[in-house]
Amino acid sequence: MWRIPVEGTHFRRQASLGVYFPDFVSHRLKLIIEVDGAHHGLDDQRRHDHTRTLWLESQGYCVLRFWNHEVKQELEAVLDTIFAVVDERRRDLSSDVS
């Protein structure tokens, strides 16, 4: 099971957000992580993903996308990216409260 071991980052797997079901979403951080298979490289799917990302971003969410092979072969780099964005989103949240 995938876990992001950073306090305050509760991610839900395939929770609904409008008509979409992101792979992983933290509503508190307004952060979505998508892990895409090869079919996401097809033109129709790429257009759908683009429309979906635009809508999710219009709702204030940041969308991170990774290919399956990146997660399998470059997990450390993927996690570094996620941790950096989580840190940035947490700082943004704390500055909004101040």
Image: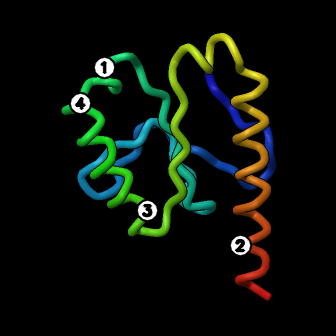
The amino acid beneath tag 2 is Leu
Real-space Cα separation, disc 1 to disc 3, in angstroms? 22 Å
**Label disc, if present, on residue 39 of the rendered structure:** 1
Determine which quarter of the picture holds residue 83. Answer: top right
Q: Quadrant of residue 55?
A: bottom left
Residue denoted by label 2? 93
Label 2 CA crowd tier, 10 Å (few <14, some 14–19, many 20+): some
Residue picked out by circle 4: 43
Front one among 51 and 25: 51
Amino acid, disc 3: Glu
For discs 1 and 4, the disc positioned in front in the rendered view:
4
Q: Would you place residue 16 above or below residue 43 in this image? A: below
Q: Are marks 1 and 4 in contact (CB under 8 Å)?
A: no
Sequence-wise, which precedes: disc 4 or disc 2? 4
Q: Residues within 10 Å of mark 1 (few under 14, many from 20)?
A: few
Tag 3's secondary structure? helix
Q: CA distance from mark 1 to mark 4?
A: 9 Å
Q: Sequence order check: which comes first, mark 1 or mark 2?
A: 1
Q: Which residue is under mark 3?
A: 57
Secondary structure category for the residue under label 4: helix
